[in-house]
Amino acid sequence: MANVIEERGLFWWFKQADGQTNTKETSVSGALTITEEGHITLVLDGSLWYAQPPDPLPWGEPRPLPPHKWVTG
């Protein structure tokens, strides 16, 4: 399985209300990998937070994003 994309960058929560606005305070560095089969992995160097997380999330476990949340970068 080969990787189509394997890049480092800055990532943040996408907010439809104000577009892809990010700042030093709201973004975190990480590594994005996308395989030829379309499997996407995002490994962040820190945590992305938002004002009211729905539930505590376990650290170190893969998890899908809720349907109404998007990460961009």
Image: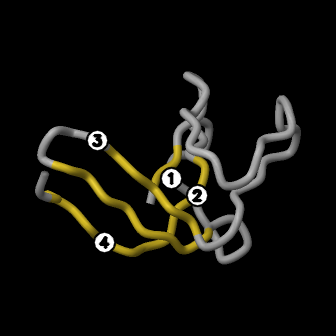
Residue on which the image places disc 3: 39
Label located before the other in sequence (1 or 2) = 2
Mark 3 vs mark 4: which is more N-terminal?
4
Q: Residue at x 78, y 41 (%)?
A: 57
* Percent position of residue 18, x then y: 59, 45
Q: Which residue is mark 1?
A: 20
Relative vertical location of residue 56 with respect to residue 47 in this rendering, above or below: above
| Closer to viewer: mark 1 or mark 3 | 3
Colour setup of the view: secondary structure
* Pointer 2 with pointer 3, Cβ within 8 A: no
Badge 4 marks a residue whose secondary structure is: strand
Task: Residue under label 2, please give it.
Answer: 12
Query: In the rendered structure, which amino acid carries the disc numbered 3?
Result: His
Is tag 1's residue or tag 4's residue first in the polypeptide sequence? 4
Decide: is 18 above or below 3.
Answer: above
Label 1, label 4: how many angstroms apart (C-alpha)? 19 Å
Going by the numbered disc 4, the residue's amino acid type is: Glu
Q: Which mark is residue 7?
A: 4
Residue contact at pointers 1 and 2, CB within 8 angstroms: yes
Q: Name the residue nearer the viewer: 60 or 49.
A: 60
* Label 4: few (<14), some (14–19) or many (≥20) C-alpha neighbours in 10 Å: few
Question: Quarter-wise, where is residue 60 in the image?
Answer: bottom right
Q: Which sits earlier in the primary sequence, circle 1 or circle 3?
A: 1
SS for dot 2: strand
Whichever of labels 2 and 3 marks the residue nearer the N terminus, that label is 2
Q: Position of residue 73 (x, y in %)?
A: 44, 60
Taking the image as shown, residue 49 lies to the left or right of residue 61, namely right
Instruction: Report how far apart the C-alphas of labels 1 and 3 lie in the structure.
Output: 23 Å
Q: Residue at x 86, y 39 (%)?
A: 56
- Tell me what residue is drawn at x 61 percent, y 27 percent: 66
* Crowd class of label 2 (few under 14; some 14 to 19; many from 20; radius 10 Å): many
